[in-house]
Amino acid sequence: MSDPNTPPPASDFIRDRVRADLDSGKVQQVVTRFPPEPNGYLHIGHAKAITLVFSIAKEFGGRCNLRMDDTNPEKEAQEYVDAIQDDVRWLGFEWDGLYYASDYFPQLFAWAEQLIENGLAYVDDQTAEQIADSRGTVRAPGKDSPFRDRPVAENLDLFRRMKSGEFPDGSKVLRARIDMAHPNLNLRDPVMYRVRKLHHQRTGDEWCIYPMYDWAHGQSDSIEGITHSLCTLEFEHHRPLYDWFCEKLGIWHPQQIEFARLNVEYMLTSKRKLLRLVEEQHVDGWDDPRMPTIRGLRRLGVPPEALVAFCRHVGIAKVNGTHELALLEHFVRDWLNQHAERRMAVLDPVELVIENWPSPEHVEWLEAGNNPEDPAAGTRQVPFSGKLWIEREDFMADPPKKFFRLGPGREVRLRFGFFVTCTGFDQDDAGNVTCIRCTYDPETKGGNAPDGRKVKGTIHWVSQAHAVAVEARLFEPLFREPDPASADGDAFVAMLRPDSRRGVTAHCEPSLGEATGGQRFQFERVGYFYCDAKDSKPGAPVFHRTVGLKDSWKKVQAKGD
Ligand code: ATP
Ligand code: MG
């Protein structure tokens, strides 16, 4: 039964298939799984796969497992196992069962023996190179191994001795005995096991033969009673092998269905390449806010709800494509607009002095709404005084007509505060504005004139005497080119932007000094900022700009920066 609180499942080629299998009675309850290899941190592509498999299980009243595909100890680590669980939960999903492919090693071994006994697998003494050379090509058939017709008893004996550690790495493999002339190269006697004398993070030194992906994956699915094994397109040509193993063993046969990988402009979704960025210290780590890892996006301040909404929106496809970064940012902005409280902060300050302010000590406390989208967010008090900081770009000495901010003789509204009129300004020898002089209209407190006169612009500000200076980090995409994944080999490294992170001092209204890790704000007119839990100290928060208010990235590009 499906959950009555969940909207009816959308229609797409996977959901249609699931629905048909339920309707026909082929499956009673949907069981899916997310099967990461714990050899790195999850990235935005995994977020899509997670959203898909967990949502389908939920929509159809089924179950979804988290399975660590830990069959290759060389690159795997407990650190990744822990991080994967944490990241899945952060996205808002909870698995029904947590499993490890390594727990299935004994069953996989027994099934391999069964294939040997049925003449469907053999031990090959050829080197990896010889095996590759005799595989043939799409046009030319492969060549049978000289060991292909070994008697069953000899194969069984050798395979067991492989397991007991008698043979060195690379000296023998177990191969499925299918067809060396098969049009699909994956079925030309694929390797099932190789000897690797490696310590495994869970099974220790119990095993020195490890199963290949194609052998372990489908059988793990079968053991768990997975009904729909959803994976990315690159496994499409492996499906016949997936099916072959299940059929020959006569075990539960899950349906593998492939969907397109998620790619987003400026982002890499290859763990190997991301690892390289970390190892060569192009970034500070897997959780660097510029990384497309779930950790990185989290530290950038991307809310999990926005990431999941994006993943749902892009849906599934049968053809790989790349989504615009602006689309992801749209979902992030949309969520933050609803939920982030507003604050004022000035990132590039210039002094504004109010000449008719009653006295230097005089302070007015103004009521400021925390979120116009959410009245329940309430209000706060913000101090206003005769010396303020405003944003340098909000003033022009000789502004054009369409500049609706401050200039000599012009009147603007200071947000939540008063109308001010510019009476003059000071410059240093280099022509930089050092001080803007204004008068204020005491009648306009709160931002409206009793005589009904209007101003064209509203700008933000902070009181100098009350301002807290904090570190703010502004980010640009890590890469100069939108498609770093298309670079040959390791050429993506040369596409890194040298200036993808910039630190500035933000002069903030006092309440921001108290911000704690994990809080999200809109700095009015500047962008959405996230208080970083890792680098913030009590009283000294560090903010990451999650996203600008408008599509600032596109604008910068258009200017040819
Ligand atoms: P990588 O090539 O970066 O190592 P992977 O596909 O090998 O990635 P796994 O840990 O094996 O990583 O992936 C777990 C699951 O996530 C698989 O089902 C895989 O198909 C899916 N997945 C991985 N990358 C993407 C992506 N970019 N878009 C959608 N799903 C993905
Ligand atoms: Mg993989």
Image: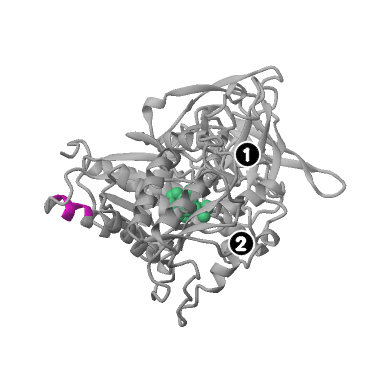
- On the image, which quarter does residue 534 sit in? top right
Asked if residue 174 lies in the magenta stretch, the reply is: no
Residue drawn at x 46%, y 28% is 370
Magenta region, main secondary structure: helix
Where residue 375 appears, as percent x and y from the top left, is 37, 28
Q: What crowding class fits label 2: few (fewer than 14 Cα within 10 Å), some (14-19), or many (20 or more)?
A: few
Residue 51 horizontal side relative to residue 63, left or right: right
Could you say which is closer to the camera, residue 100 or residue 389? Answer: 100
- Horizontal and vertical percent position of residue 355: 70, 30
Location of mark 2 (residue): 557
* Quarter of image, res 537: top right
What amino acid is at disc 1? Thr
Callout 2, which amino acid? Gln
Dot 1: within a 10 Å radius of its alpha carbon, few (fewer than 14), some, or many (20 or more) residues? Answer: many
Count of residue discs: 2
- State the residue at coordinates (43%, 53%): 156
Q: Position of residue 39 (x, y in %)?
A: 55, 45
Residue 346, compared with residue 215, is above or below; it is above
Q: Is mark 2 within 8 Å of ligand 1?
A: no
Specify start and end residues of the magenta stretch as a single range: 18-22
In the displayed structure, does residue 521 sit left or right of residue 252?
Answer: right
Tell me: 194 left or right of 57. Answer: right
Q: Is residue 70 above or below residue 358?
A: below
Q: Foreground: 139 or 336?
A: 139
Camera-near label (2 vs 1) is 2
Q: Which mark is residue 421?
A: 1
Q: Residue at x 44, y 60 (%)?
A: 122
